[in-house]
Image (cartoon, helix red, strand yellow):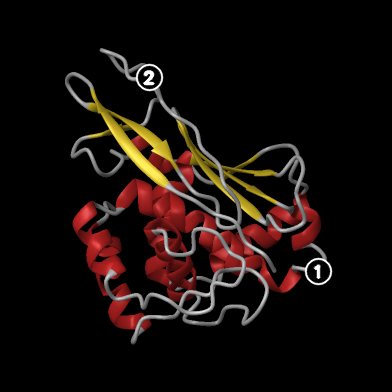
Protein backbone atom coordinates (compact mmCIF):
# COMPACT_ATOMS: atom_id res chain seq x y z
CA UNK A 1 0.00 0.00 0.00
CA UNK A 2 1.33 3.41 -0.92
CA UNK A 3 1.88 5.89 1.86
CA UNK A 4 2.28 9.66 1.99
CA UNK A 5 3.32 11.64 5.02
CA UNK A 6 5.09 14.77 6.17
CA UNK A 7 5.50 16.55 9.48
CA UNK A 8 6.79 19.71 11.10
CA UNK A 9 6.24 21.57 14.34
CA UNK A 10 6.91 25.10 15.49
CA UNK A 11 5.87 27.21 18.46
CA UNK A 12 5.27 30.93 18.97
CA UNK A 13 6.05 32.74 22.23
CA UNK A 14 3.19 34.30 24.15
CA UNK A 15 2.92 35.88 27.58
CA UNK A 16 2.98 34.34 30.13
CA UNK A 17 2.93 30.93 28.44
CA UNK A 18 3.52 29.63 24.97
CA UNK A 19 0.76 28.76 22.57
CA UNK A 20 1.46 25.70 20.47
CA UNK A 21 1.65 25.92 16.70
CA UNK A 22 1.12 22.31 15.69
CA UNK A 23 1.48 20.59 12.38
CA UNK A 24 0.94 16.89 12.94
CA UNK A 25 1.57 14.35 10.21
CA UNK A 26 -1.01 11.71 9.48
CA UNK A 27 0.12 8.10 9.55
CA UNK A 28 -0.76 7.73 5.93
CA UNK A 29 -1.43 11.25 4.73
CA UNK A 30 -0.46 14.91 5.01
CA UNK A 31 -2.38 17.34 7.20
CA UNK A 32 -1.67 20.65 8.91
CA UNK A 33 -3.32 23.29 11.00
CA UNK A 34 -1.83 26.25 12.84
CA UNK A 35 -2.73 28.18 15.95
CA UNK A 36 -2.55 31.97 15.87
CA UNK A 37 -0.58 33.41 18.76
CA UNK A 38 -2.39 35.76 21.10
CA UNK A 39 -1.27 37.89 24.02
CA UNK A 40 -3.77 36.11 26.22
CA UNK A 41 -4.78 32.53 25.57
CA UNK A 42 -8.55 31.91 25.45
CA UNK A 43 -10.10 29.13 27.50
CA UNK A 44 -9.59 25.65 26.09
CA UNK A 45 -6.56 26.44 23.97
CA UNK A 46 -3.68 23.97 24.13
CA UNK A 47 -0.87 25.50 26.14
CA UNK A 48 2.67 24.48 26.95
CA UNK A 49 4.77 25.31 29.98
CA UNK A 50 8.07 24.08 28.54
CA UNK A 51 7.63 24.97 24.86
CA UNK A 52 7.80 21.31 23.88
CA UNK A 53 4.85 19.45 25.41
CA UNK A 54 1.19 20.23 26.06
CA UNK A 55 0.14 21.21 29.56
CA UNK A 56 -2.67 18.71 30.19
CA UNK A 57 -5.39 20.23 32.34
CA UNK A 58 -7.32 18.30 34.95
CA UNK A 59 -10.44 18.69 32.84
CA UNK A 60 -8.72 17.23 29.78
CA UNK A 61 -7.23 14.40 31.85
CA UNK A 62 -10.66 13.46 33.19
CA UNK A 63 -12.24 13.47 29.72
CA UNK A 64 -12.24 10.53 27.33
CA UNK A 65 -11.87 9.97 23.61
CA UNK A 66 -14.61 11.62 21.59
CA UNK A 67 -16.12 10.62 18.25
CA UNK A 68 -17.87 12.70 15.63
CA UNK A 69 -21.35 11.62 14.47
CA UNK A 70 -19.70 10.36 11.26
CA UNK A 71 -18.24 7.40 13.18
CA UNK A 72 -20.95 4.74 13.72
CA UNK A 73 -21.09 2.60 16.84
CA UNK A 74 -19.53 -0.41 15.14
CA UNK A 75 -16.48 1.57 14.02
CA UNK A 76 -16.17 3.18 17.43
CA UNK A 77 -15.96 -0.29 18.92
CA UNK A 78 -12.92 -1.35 16.89
CA UNK A 79 -11.14 1.95 17.53
CA UNK A 80 -11.54 1.40 21.26
CA UNK A 81 -10.58 -2.28 20.84
CA UNK A 82 -7.34 -1.21 19.14
CA UNK A 83 -6.46 0.99 22.10
CA UNK A 84 -7.42 -1.78 24.53
CA UNK A 85 -5.02 -4.11 22.70
CA UNK A 86 -2.06 -1.85 23.48
CA UNK A 87 0.33 -2.59 26.33
CA UNK A 88 -0.59 -0.93 29.65
CA UNK A 89 2.14 1.72 29.42
CA UNK A 90 0.89 2.80 26.00
CA UNK A 91 -2.69 2.85 27.27
CA UNK A 92 -1.59 5.15 30.11
CA UNK A 93 0.00 7.58 27.64
CA UNK A 94 -3.07 7.46 25.43
CA UNK A 95 -5.25 8.02 28.50
CA UNK A 96 -3.35 11.25 29.14
CA UNK A 97 -4.20 12.64 25.68
CA UNK A 98 -7.49 11.02 24.72
CA UNK A 99 -9.53 13.74 26.42
CA UNK A 100 -8.04 16.22 23.94
CA UNK A 101 -8.66 13.95 20.94
CA UNK A 102 -11.62 13.46 18.62
CA UNK A 103 -11.90 10.61 16.13
CA UNK A 104 -13.71 11.27 12.87
CA UNK A 105 -14.06 9.93 9.35
CA UNK A 106 -12.10 11.03 6.31
CA UNK A 107 -14.46 12.88 4.01
CA UNK A 108 -12.69 11.56 0.93
CA UNK A 109 -9.66 9.41 0.30
CA UNK A 110 -7.25 8.82 -2.53
CA UNK A 111 -7.20 5.08 -2.01
CA UNK A 112 -3.92 5.13 -0.05
CA UNK A 113 -4.75 7.36 2.92
CA UNK A 114 -5.96 5.37 5.90
CA UNK A 115 -5.60 7.99 8.61
CA UNK A 116 -4.79 11.63 9.30
CA UNK A 117 -3.84 13.21 12.65
CA UNK A 118 -4.15 16.98 13.11
CA UNK A 119 -3.36 19.39 15.91
CA UNK A 120 -5.71 22.33 16.36
CA UNK A 121 -6.15 25.23 18.77
CA UNK A 122 -8.24 23.25 21.24
CA UNK A 123 -7.11 19.69 20.70
CA UNK A 124 -6.33 16.93 18.26
CA UNK A 125 -8.32 15.09 15.62
CA UNK A 126 -7.72 11.64 14.17
CA UNK A 127 -9.66 10.97 10.98
CA UNK A 128 -9.81 7.43 9.61
CA UNK A 129 -10.79 5.85 6.31
CA UNK A 130 -13.60 3.81 7.82
CA UNK A 131 -14.51 2.09 4.56
CA UNK A 132 -11.00 0.80 3.91
CA UNK A 133 -10.38 -0.14 7.53
CA UNK A 134 -13.66 -2.02 7.51
CA UNK A 135 -12.75 -3.83 4.31
CA UNK A 136 -9.46 -4.41 2.50
CA UNK A 137 -7.37 -2.87 5.30
CA UNK A 138 -9.28 -4.54 8.11
CA UNK A 139 -6.13 -6.25 9.42
CA UNK A 140 -4.42 -2.87 9.73
CA UNK A 141 -6.94 -1.30 12.11
CA UNK A 142 -4.88 -1.50 15.29
CA UNK A 143 -1.69 -0.40 13.54
CA UNK A 144 -3.34 2.64 11.98
CA UNK A 145 -5.23 3.70 15.11
CA UNK A 146 -2.15 3.44 17.33
CA UNK A 147 0.07 5.11 14.73
CA UNK A 148 -2.27 8.06 14.51
CA UNK A 149 -2.70 8.39 18.27
CA UNK A 150 1.07 7.96 18.50
CA UNK A 151 1.34 11.33 16.74
CA UNK A 152 -0.81 12.87 19.47
CA UNK A 153 1.30 11.26 22.21
CA UNK A 154 4.44 12.54 20.48
CA UNK A 155 3.37 16.18 20.15
CA UNK A 156 1.58 16.35 23.50
CA UNK A 157 3.86 14.41 25.85
CA UNK A 158 7.31 13.76 24.36
CA UNK A 159 9.95 16.47 24.76
CA UNK A 160 12.78 17.10 22.33
CA UNK A 161 15.43 15.24 24.33
CA UNK A 162 13.36 12.07 24.63
CA UNK A 163 12.32 12.26 20.98
CA UNK A 164 15.97 12.48 19.90
CA UNK A 165 17.01 9.59 22.14
CA UNK A 166 14.23 7.43 20.73
CA UNK A 167 14.88 8.38 17.12
CA UNK A 168 18.55 7.47 17.24
CA UNK A 169 17.59 3.88 18.10
CA UNK A 170 15.44 3.45 14.99
CA UNK A 171 17.44 2.19 11.97
CA UNK A 172 17.46 4.40 8.90
CA UNK A 173 17.23 3.35 5.30
CA UNK A 174 15.42 0.27 4.13
CA UNK A 175 12.50 -0.35 1.79
CA UNK A 176 10.43 2.81 1.95
CA UNK A 177 8.89 1.92 -1.40
CA UNK A 178 6.73 4.72 -2.76
CA UNK A 179 6.15 6.21 0.67
CA UNK A 180 6.88 9.88 1.18
CA UNK A 181 8.19 11.11 4.50
CA UNK A 182 9.10 7.78 6.06
CA UNK A 183 12.41 9.26 7.23
CA UNK A 184 10.62 12.07 9.05
CA UNK A 185 11.16 11.84 12.83
CA UNK A 186 7.45 12.24 13.56
CA UNK A 187 6.59 9.33 11.28
CA UNK A 188 9.42 7.22 12.66
CA UNK A 189 8.13 7.80 16.18
CA UNK A 190 4.48 7.07 15.35
CA UNK A 191 5.35 3.93 13.38
CA UNK A 192 7.56 2.59 16.17
CA UNK A 193 5.08 3.63 18.87
CA UNK A 194 2.44 1.45 17.21
CA UNK A 195 4.87 -1.47 17.04
CA UNK A 196 5.90 -0.99 20.67
CA UNK A 197 2.29 -0.59 21.84
CA UNK A 198 1.33 -3.83 20.10
CA UNK A 199 4.52 -5.62 21.19
CA UNK A 200 5.55 -6.05 17.58
CA UNK A 201 2.26 -7.63 16.51
CA UNK A 202 1.69 -5.34 13.53
CA UNK A 203 0.67 -6.07 9.98
CA UNK A 204 3.64 -7.26 7.90
CA UNK A 205 2.18 -5.66 4.79
CA UNK A 206 -0.33 -2.95 4.12
CA UNK A 207 -0.43 0.00 6.50
CA UNK A 208 2.69 1.59 7.84
CA UNK A 209 6.10 2.43 6.47
CA UNK A 210 9.20 0.45 5.64
CA UNK A 211 10.78 1.56 8.91
CA UNK A 212 12.86 -1.09 10.60
CA UNK A 213 12.32 -1.91 14.25
CA UNK A 214 14.90 -0.90 16.86
CA UNK A 215 17.23 -3.65 18.02
CA UNK A 216 14.87 -4.05 20.98
CA UNK A 217 11.35 -2.62 21.13
CA UNK A 218 11.41 -3.07 24.90
CA UNK A 219 14.58 -1.01 25.30
CA UNK A 220 13.26 1.62 22.89
CA UNK A 221 10.05 1.96 24.86
CA UNK A 222 11.61 2.15 28.33
CA UNK A 223 11.56 5.99 28.42
CA UNK A 224 7.90 5.93 27.42
CA UNK A 225 7.20 3.44 30.18
CA UNK A 226 8.89 5.73 32.71
CA UNK A 227 6.89 8.66 31.34
CA UNK A 228 3.67 6.68 31.77
CA UNK A 229 4.55 5.93 35.38
CA UNK A 230 5.20 9.62 36.05
CA UNK A 231 1.74 10.72 34.96
CA UNK A 232 -0.74 11.88 37.62
CA UNK A 233 -3.12 9.21 38.88
Q: Quadrant of residue 217?
A: bottom left
Q: What element carries label 2?
A: loop
Give the x, y percent position of residue 144. Answer: 60, 63
Residue 207 location, quadrant: bottom right
Q: Mark 2 points at which residue?
A: 43
Please report whichever mark, 1 or 2, sits nearer to the chain's N-terminal start: 2
Of residues 108 and 128, the one drawn nearer to the viewer in this rendering: 108
Of marks 1 and 2, the one in the foreground: 1
Residue at position x 31%, y 51% from top?
157
Q: Residues within 10 Å of mark 1 (few under 14, many from 20)?
A: few
> Foreground: 104 or 109?
109
Q: Quick check: 169 left or right of 65?
A: left
Quadrant of the image for the C terminus?
bottom left
Looking at the image, residue 212 lies above or below residue 77: below
Q: Is any part of residue 57 visible from this angle?
A: no
Q: Where is residue 156 in the image (x, y as percent from the top left)?
A: 35, 46
Q: Horizontal and vertical percent for residue 200?
A: 49, 82
Residue name at image x 36 percent, y 78 percent? 171
Query: What's the distance in space between the residues labelled 1 and 2, CA to CA?
Result: 42 Å
Judging by the rendered image, the residue that carries numbered circle 1 is: 136
Secondary element at image label 1: loop
Sort mark 2 into few (<14), some (14-19) or many (20+) by Cα contacts within 10 Å: few
Amino acid sequence: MHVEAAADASRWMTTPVRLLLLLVAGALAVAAVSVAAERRAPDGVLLTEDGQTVAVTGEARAATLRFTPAVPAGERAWVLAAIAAARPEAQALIGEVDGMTTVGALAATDGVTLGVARGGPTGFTVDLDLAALGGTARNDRATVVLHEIGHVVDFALVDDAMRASLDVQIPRGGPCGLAVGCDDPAERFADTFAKWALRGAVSAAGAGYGIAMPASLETWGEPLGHLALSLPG
